[in-house]
Every structure is written in C-alpha cells, then in structure tokens.
C-alpha cells in the first residue's frame, strides 16, 4: 500500500488530496479504503473517520478533503479473505495567514501618546476599542502622527465601541495618540504585514 496526503504544508480551507494504491496483482484490486484524521494535540488514539474511497481495478484511490487543522491522515484497507489488511500514515501541517500584530497598548487615561514605533510594511491597521463609564458626551479619538509630517485619525462618539484606522501617511516611523472623554478604558492594537500561523 502507498499513501500520500498533499500539499504539505496546506493553507487552512484549501483542499488536501489523499492518494495512493492498494494492490497485490496488476488487476482485480477493487476495494474500499477508509480515511481517518488525528488532530495534533489530541490523544494518540483520537482518530475520527472522515470518509472513504473505492479503488480502481489497478488499486489506485484518491479523495479530497478540506484542510482545517494540523494533524495526521490515515488510510486503512480492512483486507479480505484473500488479501491482508494495510494502513499508512501521512502528516500535514496546516497554516492560516492573518495580519501580524506589531504593537499593542491599553490604559485608563484620557490623553496618551505611544512610544515611537516603526511600521514594518508600507501599510498598517490600528484597532481601538473603548468603554466609558457614562455621563457627559463620550468620545474616542485615535491618531497616527508620522515623523517628518503626515497624520491620520478616526473618531467615535459612543459610550463603547471600536475604531479601525487603515492606511499610511507620512513616515513609517511615528507615534499613535489616544484621546477620550473622562472615565474611559481603551485598548489599541497595531497590525502590519501578513504572518502564517500553524493551526
């Protein structure tokens, strides 16, 4: 028996093709092959049945599944009165691409400025969430000020919420500023570039 799960590694949500061959002679090898999956980090015997394929007369089989998490695929031929059983394993790493977080801060102050940071790529995304105790006219204001000029800002006027500042103005080195009404807690997270994470 031969068996291969590909591609390796695979992107989450992409197709993983399971292929192989179960045979004893050149012809007359039609059989059922069952597929099981074991997710990395689960008990060693925690294989779950995913489906099956019927081989061709030559013994070839293939079946496509969606990559969800890193783990090991197993192909199993149960055997017959004239053929012994067989099983093969193949591990596949699954990665997911998402924005890379490069900085983050949180505080409870109405006026704050970050340390000087360098945005590693041309563009960035800064997400601010806040919650105010109420009273008065609540607001939250997030600003990027680039060294040498250029600025961008977003503003919200609610007791609680979130803001997203997308883009890039001025130098890639600069500071973020937060302004809120009194009695507000806030958090800012800055993302730039794409990273692949194993899932």
Image: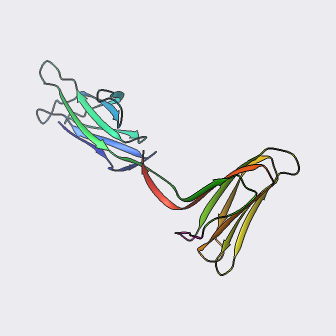
Q: In the picture, which quadrant includes the N terminus? A: top left
Q: Nearer the viewer, residue 121 or 18?
A: 121
Residue depicted at x 60% and y 64%? 124
Residue 105 position in % (x across, y down): 61, 56
Q: Is residue 118 magenta?
A: yes
183 relative to 103 in the view: left or right: right
Q: How many marks?
A: 0
96 relative to 159 in the view: left or right: left
Residue 79 position in % (x across, y down): 18, 23
Q: Is residue 165 above or below residue 149?
A: above
User: In the image, which residues are magenta?
Assistant: 116-122
Q: Is residue 164 magenta?
A: no
Look at the magenta stretch and give its main secondary structure.
loop
Q: In the picture, which quadrant includes the C terminus? A: top left
79 relative to 68 in the view: left or right: left
As drawn, the residue found furthest toward the bottom would be 148
Residue depicted at x 34% and y 43%? 17
Q: Is residue 28 above or below residue 72?
A: above
Q: Is residue 39 above or below residue 117?
A: above
Q: Nearer the viewer, residue 106 or 59?
A: 106
Residue 68 position in % (x across, y down): 43, 40
Q: Nearer the viewer, residue 181 or 167?
A: 181
Indicate the quadrant where residue 32 lies. top left
Colour scheme in use: rainbow
């Amino acid at each position: 028996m031969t068996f291969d799960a590909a591609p390796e590694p695979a992107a989450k949500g992409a197709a993983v093709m399971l292929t192989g061959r179960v045979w004893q002679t050149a012809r007359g090898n039609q059989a059922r092959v069952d597929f099981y999956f074991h997710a990395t980090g689960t008990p060693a015997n925690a294989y779950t049945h995913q489906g099956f394929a019927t081989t061709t007369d030559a013994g070839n089989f293939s079946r496509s599944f969606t990559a969800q998490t890193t783990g090991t695929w197993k192909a199993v031929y149960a055997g017959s009165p004239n053929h012994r059983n067989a099983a093969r394993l193949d591990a596949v790493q699954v990665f997911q691409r998402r924005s890379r977080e490069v900085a983050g801060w949180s505080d409870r102050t109405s006026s704050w400025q970050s340390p000087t940071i360098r945005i590693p790529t041309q563009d960035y995304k800064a997400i601010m969430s806040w919650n105010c105790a109420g009273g008065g006219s609540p607001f939250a204001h997030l600003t990027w000020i680039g060294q040498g000029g250029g600025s961008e800002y977003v503003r919200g006027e609610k007791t609680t919420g979130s803001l997203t500042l997308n883009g890039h103005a001025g130098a890639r080195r600069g500071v973020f500023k937060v302004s809120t009404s009194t009695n507000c807690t806030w958090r800012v997270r800055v993302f730039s570039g794409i990273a692949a994470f194993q899932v």
